[in-house]
Image: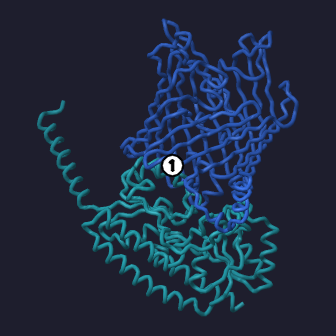
Chain colours: A cyan, B blue
């Protein structure tokens, strides 16, 4: 039997709990920002500071081409204020299900809360002539892995600052200031990374997928080949044997792969060519040390520099 | 007059090709819809069927999808086979209502799991016997409207309510909703719950019911329950994974103090992916009071009976856009009079996709 006093106590607790929840909600971030990949969430966090809570639907150790379109992802973004897509078709395999499935009109394409982060970026590898899947799973709009060039993330930061300012004018100056600080830090770090890789200018490496193109162009390296014969097509043993032979012949000794690609194929190829395979993340969170965009580039630059140095010593 | 015509003709011939090429068009093709085609071809050997071995008539599905305006998206699926060409689905969708997806037009009703699939997305070549006998081979398709509400519960919980046009049973519709009374508006309720067990594994539990008034004056209904456990390792989402799924379906008719349990049954399946290019699967099924291709009475007319069977397949996917599947299926059916029939099939299915491919739900 519940006494009247007990009822009052329960009611009091509910009221206090609700008020505390409302206070907590009011004190939390002004904008809830969801992104396709961790790199965009990292940039959004730098630009938004305390006024933004950013999170990514795709984990850094997950292939951004093949994210299972789980309904739980739809639920995660049902109350997001902003959604930042990589664009250029990288997330087209799952985003067309997840975004409408969120039933959140604020973040649908065309709404102020939808951001295509590729806008304003200088895109490379745009196919010329006929676009055919005989060339594999090509991206008709160009290479979507632009977030592998530090300079492109400065463009993204500036873009996000504009969008955040439109949606949250009260903090517009904070977003602009943070974007400028981000750009300054990225420019300074880029110089250091360029200096680290300068001794290997013009060196060739093999990547698993064509997701290092922007990085290679920025730091003066070359792609000798890819582990997969065409985008999205797994390698056959004969192809790998031929690639290993040509690597050996040309003195290419570094193979770069990501956590979500077949490490055995990369290691086997490197071993046959007399070189080494390096796990270098293309996305933030790909390895534990790559906690934000700066740390990711630092990990990539350090690991590739060490591998190239070891390859040159062989 | 002839001189004028010759002059005009010469004027056209001598006009600058560059100027002609540069003539602007007032019709833009920039907003063309995304178009895709899926071709499905089957080679079959079935010793228990009165059919020649070899290629069976294929099916092509053409999908046309485009944003209409800031409010609506239109999706149309045309299906072409040897006998017909028809707009299987044509519906408009809007997500402008917070928390709700509204869909209207010619729809595939949101019932159960297998009933949502297009033929090329079937995990096995044939639909389960109980699905064919309750909803139809490709689910329940009809003109209507559906609203799917994502509830504010801490897990993904979606409630869908639908209302459809009253239609009698036909070879494509296993359900008789053909009563001509004004109040006959078949309705659907579907509840879908999905929780993340961990980063890689999800558990989905669903329940569905559809009901309407038949041309015989009886209420006809199907209800179903489904359970799916899916594992897709995040680090190898394109290389590994498995899905265990079971679905129970029950079809009934009632009214005027009469109750008729028309058909019921279940299937359970396991699909396992062990490499980027390889999948395999097994399925077992049971169906009561159900029709099959081989169970016939003494006059050669199909009769309902008890059916149980199993299927096993292996699929090779050289890319995302093509698939070759080898499948063996065996069904044993027993009629009410004790007659027995076997249905064994060895099938080789080819599936090809060109252009835009509408994504399949998780």
Q: Residue at x 36, y 43 (%)?
A: B152
Residue in the foreground of this view, choosing between B210 and A196: B210
Left or right placement of residue A162 versus residue A225 in this view: left
Task: Locate the C terminus of chain A by quadrant.
Answer: bottom right
Residue B192's place in the image compared with A96, above or below, is above
In the figure, residue B333 lies in which quadrant? top right
Instruction: Mark 1: give few (<14), some (14-19) or many (20+) Cα within 10 Å.
Output: some
Q: Residue at x 57, y 46 (%)?
A: B65
Image mark 1: chain: B
Q: Which residue is mark 1?
A: B67
From the top left corner, tell me how far across and down residue B271 is, in percent. Answer: 66, 44
Q: Residue at x 43, y 56 (%)?
A: A110
In the figure, residue B331 lies in which quadrant? top right
Answer yes or no: is residue B213 visible.
yes
Q: Report helix, strand or loop for mark 1.
A: strand
From the top left corner, tell me how far across and down residue A134 is, in percent. Answer: 74, 61
Residue A190's place in the image compared with B53, above or below, is below
From the top left corner, tell me how far across and down residue B172 is, in percent. Answer: 65, 26
Residue B47's place in the image compared with A119, above or below, is above
From the top left corner, tell me how far across and down residue A46 is, in percent. Answer: 37, 73
């Amino acid at each position: 039997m519940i006494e009247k006093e007990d009822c009052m106590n329960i009611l009091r607790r509910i009221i206090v709990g609700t008020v505390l929840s409302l206070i907590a909600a009011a004190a939390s971030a002004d904008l809830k920002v969801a992104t396709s990949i961790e790199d965009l969430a990292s940039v959004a966090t730098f630009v938004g500071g305390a006024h933004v809570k950013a999170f990514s639907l795709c984990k850094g150790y997950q292939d951004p081409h093949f994210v299972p379109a789980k309904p739980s992802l739809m639920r995660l973004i049902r109350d997001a204020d902003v959604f930042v897509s990589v664009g250029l078709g990288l997330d087209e395999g799952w985003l067309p299900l997840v975004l409408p499935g969120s039933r959140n009109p604020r973040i649908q394409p065309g709404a102020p809360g939808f951001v295509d982060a590729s806008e304003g970026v200088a895109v490379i590898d745009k196919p010329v002539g006929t676009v055919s899947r005989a060339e594999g799973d090509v991206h008709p709009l160009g290479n979507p892995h632009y977030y592998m060039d530090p300079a492109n993330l400065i463009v993204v930061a500036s873009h996000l600052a504009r969008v955040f300012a439109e949606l949250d004018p009260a903090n517009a100056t904070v977003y602009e200031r943070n974007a400028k600080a981000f750009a300054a830090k990225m420019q300074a770090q880029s110089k250091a990374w360029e200096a680290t890789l300068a001794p290997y200018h013009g060196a060739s490496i093999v990547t698993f997928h064509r997701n290092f193109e922007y990085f290679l162009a920025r730091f003066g390296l070359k792609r000798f080949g890819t582990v997969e014969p065409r985008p999205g097509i797994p390698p056959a043993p004969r192809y790998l044997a031929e690639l290993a032979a040509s690597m050996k012949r040309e003195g290419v000794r570094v193979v770069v792969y990501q956590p979500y690609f077949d490490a055995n194929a990369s290691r086997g190829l490197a071993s046959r060519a007399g070189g080494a395979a390096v796990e270098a993340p293309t996305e933030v969170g790909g390895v534990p040390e790559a906690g934000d965009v700066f740390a990711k580039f630092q990990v990539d630059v350090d690991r590739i520099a060490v591998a190239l140095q070891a390859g040159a010593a062989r | 007059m002839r001189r004028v015509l010759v002059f005009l003709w010469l004027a056209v011939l001598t006009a600058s090709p560059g100027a002609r090429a540069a003539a602007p068009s007032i019709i833009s093709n920039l907003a063309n819809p995304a178009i895709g085609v899926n071709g499905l071809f089957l080679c079959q050997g079935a010793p228990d069927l009165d059919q020649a071995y070899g290629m069976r008539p294929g099916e092509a599905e053409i999908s046309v999808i485009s944003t209409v305006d800031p409010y609506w998206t239109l999706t149309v699926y045309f299906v072409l086979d040897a006998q017909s060409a028809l707009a299987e689905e044509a519906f408009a969708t809007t997500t402008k209502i917070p928390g709700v997806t509204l869909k209207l037009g010619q729809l595939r009703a949101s019932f159960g799991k297998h009933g949502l699939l297009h033929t090329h997305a079937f995990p096995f070549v044939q639909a389960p016997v109980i699905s064919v006998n309750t909803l139809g081979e490709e689910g329940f398709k009809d003109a209507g409207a559906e609203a799917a509400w994502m509830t504010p519960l801490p897990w993904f919980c979606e409630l869908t309510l639908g209302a459809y046009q009253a239609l009698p049973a036909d070879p494509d519709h296993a359900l008789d909703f053909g009563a001509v009374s004004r109040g006959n508006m078949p309705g659907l309720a579907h509840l879908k719950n999905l929780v993340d067990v961990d980063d890689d594994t999800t558990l989905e539990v669903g329940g569905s019911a559809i009901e309407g008034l038949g041309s015989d004056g009886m209420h006809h209904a199907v209800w179903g329950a489904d359970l799916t456990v899916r594992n897709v390792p995040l680090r190898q989402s394109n290389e590994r994974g498995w899905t265990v799924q079971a679905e129970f379906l029950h079809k009934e008719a009632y009214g005027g103090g009469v109750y008729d349990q028309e058909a019921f049954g279940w299937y359970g399946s396991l699909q396992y992916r062990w490499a980027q290019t390889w999948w395999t699967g097994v399925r077992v099924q049971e169906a009561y009071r159900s029709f099959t291709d081989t169970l016939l009475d003494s006059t050669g007319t199909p009769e309902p009976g008890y059916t149980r069977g199993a299927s096993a397949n292996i699929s090779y996917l050289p890319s995302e856009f093509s698939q070759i599947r080898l499948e063996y299926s065996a069904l044993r059916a027993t009629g009410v009079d004790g007659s027995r029939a076997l249905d064994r099939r060895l099938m080789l299915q080819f599936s090809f996709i060109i252009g835009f491919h509408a994504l399949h739900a998780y």
